[in-house]
Amino acid sequence: MKIRPILDKVVVKVQKTEAATRGGILLAKSSSKEEPIRAEVVARGDGGMTDDGRKLKMYIEPGDIVLIPKGAGTSFMMDGKEYIIISQQDVLAAIYPNT
């Protein structure tokens, strides 16, 4: 199945991460600390227009790893995997490997 977001929307696939010690012992997540969600961008829209009529530039590309706030966007399941549709402006950061 293929999905194509519109305007400034970005579709991300949630990456499941578990905290572990160096020895591999899984740690319980703390409910008091809200960590952002790490996800891979799978598709993005073409942009859209700003309020003053300028074309909105898209900075996020498919394949980018991003951090998004918990509870942001609209989550859905497709082919047994969790995805979230979010506006580009709600993406907190992109993570790039050391280059």
Image (cartoon, rainbow, N blue to C red):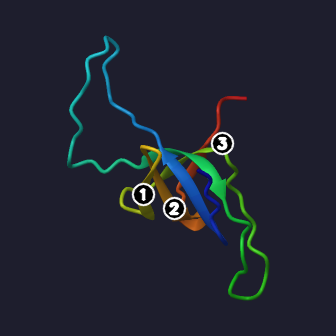
Q: Mark 3 points at which residue?
A: 63
**Residue ID at (21%, 32%):** 28
Are the residues at dot 1 and dot 2 in contact (C-beta closer than 8 Å)? yes
Residue 73 percent location from the top left of the image: 45, 64
Are the residues at dot 1 and dot 3 in contact (C-beta closer than 8 Å)? no
Is 32 on the left-hand or right-hand side of 40? left
Q: What is the C-alpha distance between the residues marked 1 and 3?
A: 19 Å
Residue 94 percent location from the top left of the image: 60, 47
Mark before the other along the chain sequence, 1 or 2: 1
Mark 1, other Cα within 10 Å: few <14 / some 14–19 / many ≥20: few
Q: Residue 85 carries which label?
A: 2
Is 1 on the left-hand or right-hand side of 23? right
Mark before the other along the chain sequence, 1 or 3: 3
Mark before the other along the chain sequence, 2 or 3: 3
Q: What is the C-alpha distance between the residues marked 1 and 2?
A: 8 Å
**Residue ID at (61%, 48%):** 42
**Amino acid type of disc 1?**
Phe
Residue at the outermost top position = 23
Residue 24 percent location from the top left of the image: 31, 15
Of the 4 image quadrants, the one containing the C terminus is: top right
**Amino acid type of disc 3?**
Gly
- Please tell me in which quadrant of the rendered image residue 95 appears: top right
Mark 2, other Cα within 10 Å: few <14 / some 14–19 / many ≥20: some
**Residue ID at (31%, 51%):** 34
Q: Residue 90 carries which label?
A: none
Is 4 on the left-hand or right-hand side of 92? right
Q: Mark 1 points at which residue?
A: 76
Q: What is the C-alpha distance between the residues marked 2 and 3?
A: 15 Å
Are the residues at dot 2 and dot 3 in contact (C-beta closer than 8 Å)? no
Disc 2, SS: strand
